[in-house]
Image (spheres, rainbow, N blue to C red):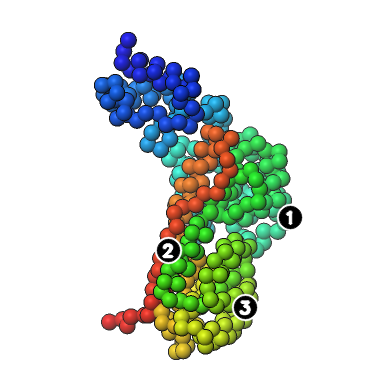
Amino acid sequence: MNLYTKIENDLQDAIIDGRLKPGDKIPSVNDLRIKYNVSHITVRRVYQNLGDKKLICKRGLGYIVQSKEQNDYQPRTNTIGCFLRPPRPRNNYDNFFNDIHSGIEWECSLRGMNFYAPHICSYLAQPYTLTPEKLELFIPAMKECAKMVDAYIVDERIPDNILGAVMSVVDKPFMLVNRYSALPNIDVVVPPYRANMQRGFEAARQMRYDALVYLQSGHPRGKELTAVFEHYRSNWPEVKVIPDCSIEDWKVTNERLSQALKELLKKTRRLLIFFEGGGLYELLLNHILKHPEYRLGDNCGIMISQNYGFPDTIPVRPACFVLKPEKIAGLVVENLLERLKNRNRPYSCYSPPPEIDLGESLYPISPKP
C-alpha cells in the first residue's frame, strides 16, 4: 500500500467513525510528515484527495473536517447580488462607501464570484430622495433576481422592513453592510464602533480631559453611535449633549456649542468635543481657532467618529476613529461565502480590529517654522 493511501485511509476512517468531528482541525502537514515519515508533497496529495471526496475543506492556513451542510451546498450561479449604492465621483474628503463598493467588487473577483448590481441601486445614491415608495420597489427587484444569485449584499440604506419582506420569501443568505439590524437571520459587517469609542474615550481621559460635549448628528446611523455613547457616558464627570447638529443650521449649533463650552470651562480644566461624523470638523476647528479663550489641545480638544468627511488639506488633523473600508469589504465577502458553505452557522456581527488616530486636535498646536 502506498504511504499516501495509508494516510488517506487513516484520516478517512477517523472522520467516518467520529474520532474527527465536523469542524475539527486535520493534523498539519508537518505533523503528518513527521508521523508517517513522508514528504510534504505526499501530505498535500492526501489533502487533495480528501477534499475531492468532500470530507475536508480549507480553513485559514489548514484544513478542517467538512460538515454535512457544507457537503450539501452547491453554488448554482456563482453570482452575488449586490444592492449597494453606486460609486460617486471621487473627492478629497469622503470616499468611504466608494472604497467599500470597489473593495467588495475586488474581493468577489479574487474569489471568482460574479458581481450583479441592478439598475435600481441608483436610488440608493440619493438618501434624501429615497422615499418609502422608492424603497418598496426594492422588494420585487430583489425577488426577481433570486434565481440569478446565490446570496445578497445589501446597503445600510435599505431598511429592515424591506429586507424582512424579501427574506420571508427568498431563502438566500443576506449580508448587511455598515449598520446593525433587528432581523434575527442576517449577518452584518459594521465598523468597530464600541471598541473604538472605548479606546478613544480612555485615551482622552488619560490625557486629563474631564468633561465631554457630545454633538449628535441627528442622522439615523448616528443613533447607533449614540447608543454606544450611552454605555460609556458614566465615565465622564461632566457631559453636555447637543442634538441634531447635522440637521440644524450651523449657526444654531454654533450658539449651543458656545454656551456649552462657556458653562463647562467654568468648572473643568479640559473638555473634549466629540462629533458623530466628520462633516462638521472644519467648522468646529474654525470655531475653536478664532476664539482665543478656547485653546486647542490645552483647555479643549476635538475627536470625531470617522477619518472621513473633511478635506485632506485641513490644517489640524483630527483625533478620529479609523475606518478601513477595504477591511470591511473583505469581511463582507469572506463571511458571506462562509455562510454559503454552512447555512446553519450562527448569525453574527463582524467588525475589523479597532484603531484610533490621535491626530493633532488633542495636543497643543506647535508653531510652524
- Given the image, on which type of amino acid does mark 1 rest? Glu
Q: Is residue 351 placed above or below 8 in the rendered structure?
A: below
Where residue 143 appears, as percent x and y from the top left, is 68, 40
Say which mark, if any, is on residue 61: none
* Residue located 48% across and 27% down the image: 21
Q: Is residue 285 left or right of residue 254?
A: left
Q: Earlier in the sequence, mark 2 or mark 1?
A: 1
Q: Which residue is mark 3?
A: 249
Where residue 59 sits in the image (x, y, percent)? 43, 35
Question: Foreground residue, 259 or 157?
Answer: 259
* Marked residue nearer the N-terminal end (3 or 2): 3
Q: Nearer the viewer, residue 316 or 57?
A: 57
| Residue 41 is at least partly visible in this image | no
Q: Nearer the viewer, mark 3 or mark 2?
A: 2
> Comparing marks 2 and 1, which lies closer to the viewer?
2
Classify 193 as above or below 115: below
Q: Is residue 89 above or below residue 121?
A: below
Q: Amino acid at mark 2?
A: Ile
Looking at the picture, tell me which residue is in the foreground, 110 or 307: 307
Which residue in the protein does label 2 denote?
Answer: 356
Instruction: Mark 2: give few (<14), some (14-19) or many (20+) Cα within 10 Å.
Output: some
Extreme top residue here?
A: 1
Q: Residue 133: which numbered mark, if any?
A: 1
Amino acid type of the residue that numbered disc 3 sits on in the rendered structure:
Asp
Question: On the picture, is 103 further left or further right than 157?
Answer: left
The crowd level at tag 1 (other Cα within 10 Å; few <14, some 14-19, many 20+) is: few
